Image (spheres, rainbow, N blue to C red):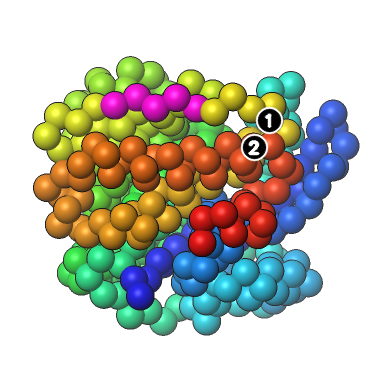
Amino acid sequence: MRKIIGVGETVFDIIFKDNQPISAKPGGSVYNALISLGRLNMQPIFISEIGDDRIGEIIKSFLDENQIETKYIYSYDRGKTPLALAFLDEKQNADYLFYKDYPADRLDYIMPRIDPDDIIIIGSYFALNPVLHDRLVDLLNFAQERRAIIYYDVNFRKSHINDVGHLMPTILDNFEYADIIKGSEEDFMNIYGEDDPPQIYKDHISFYSKNFIYTMGENGARLFGPNNLDKQYASKTIVPKSTVGAGDNFNAGIIFGLIKENVTREELINGISQEKWDRIINYAIEFSSYVCTTLDNYISKDFAEKFI
């Protein structure tokens, strides 16, 4: 069975509406995607770090409950598991505050086995953090040597806009490793101040990766790929409750689709057929749309049963 290996932060999400907490649950960008994939019986592996505290215990227990391999998670006792406060606006989009207390030693893990066509997921500030990047590069180099597929969700929040110049070399470094780059219109406005998908692909992405997915919230997504592939996909019409897990579950849908369609790294490089991409993107839209209609960060077990 092909492995899915996610590398990312773990946080405890507290969601606010009208300045009142309405939901609290484990989260994190890659974490949310892996929970959904676990519920789809994909048995993903998670590389992360948590505090040796009560919140850390809740997070690890939730991972175990959802069939996520946790032996590569580093548990630290000189610090606390971080909190993420998400404040929903009138469109149910979130503005974030993060509270973090990390130790000096970070991400001390054993390298998992990686085989050809396994899928590695990285993203958000965790993939840019200079304290962690050397350890991440070790994994990415090994994954590339082993001919695994590397999926990079840019997920660049506006709280880091002032650091763009400093972080740009690391962003480009991640682009260079990635076989698929996915980002939202907000991500690329935050990084480049641009919102023209074909121009972004031409000027900033195609040199590094031919496979690019640009998401636009309620306006759908646009796909670029080898052989001049360029296609727009409409979003589903829904009444959202929260968009906190939308992008993460879009990622889960892409990864699930790559496995279901048995897409290899070689096929990605040479170009997946449009028909295959249609089915893969459909999973992504289905998963992200469903999550937006709930206050959860992941698809439900009942919803997952429809796809198993």
Q: Main secondary structure of the magenta part?
A: strand
Farthest front residue in view:
306
- Helix, strand or loop at disc 2? helix
Query: Is residue 178 inside the magenta stretch?
Result: no
Res. 305 in view: yes
Residue at numbered disc 2: 292
**Where is residue 219 shown, x and y percent of the image?**
48, 21
Q: Is residue 179 left or right of residue 165?
A: left
Q: CA distance from mark 2 to mark 1?
A: 5 Å
Instruction: Sort mark 1 into few (<14), some (14-19) or many (20+) by Cα contacts within 10 Å.
Output: some
Question: Relative to residue 25, is residue 236 depicted above or below?
Answer: above
Q: Quadrant of the N terminus?
A: bottom left
**Where is residue 61 shown, x and y percent of the image?**
70, 74
Q: Which residues are magenta?
A: 231-235
Q: Is residue 285 left or right of residue 281?
A: right
Q: Amino acid at mark 1?
A: Pro
Residue at the spot 67% in from the left edge and 73% down from the top edge:
65
Residue 227's disc number: none
Q: Amino acid at mark 2?
A: Cys
Residue at the spot 63% in from the left edge and 52% down from the top edge:
303
- Which comes sooner in the sequence, label 2 or label 1? 1
Residue at the spot 76% in from the left edge and 48% down from the top edge:
14
Res. 124 in view: no
Query: Is residue 234 inside the magenta stretch?
Result: yes
Judge by depth and name the residue closer to the eye, 261 or 159.
261
Residue at numbered disc 1: 240
Q: How many marks?
A: 2
Pointers 2 and 1 in contact (C-beta within 8 Å): yes
Residue at the spot 52% in from the left edge and 76% down from the top edge:
69
Farthest right residue in view:
20
**Where is residue 49 shown, x and y percent of the image?**
56, 69
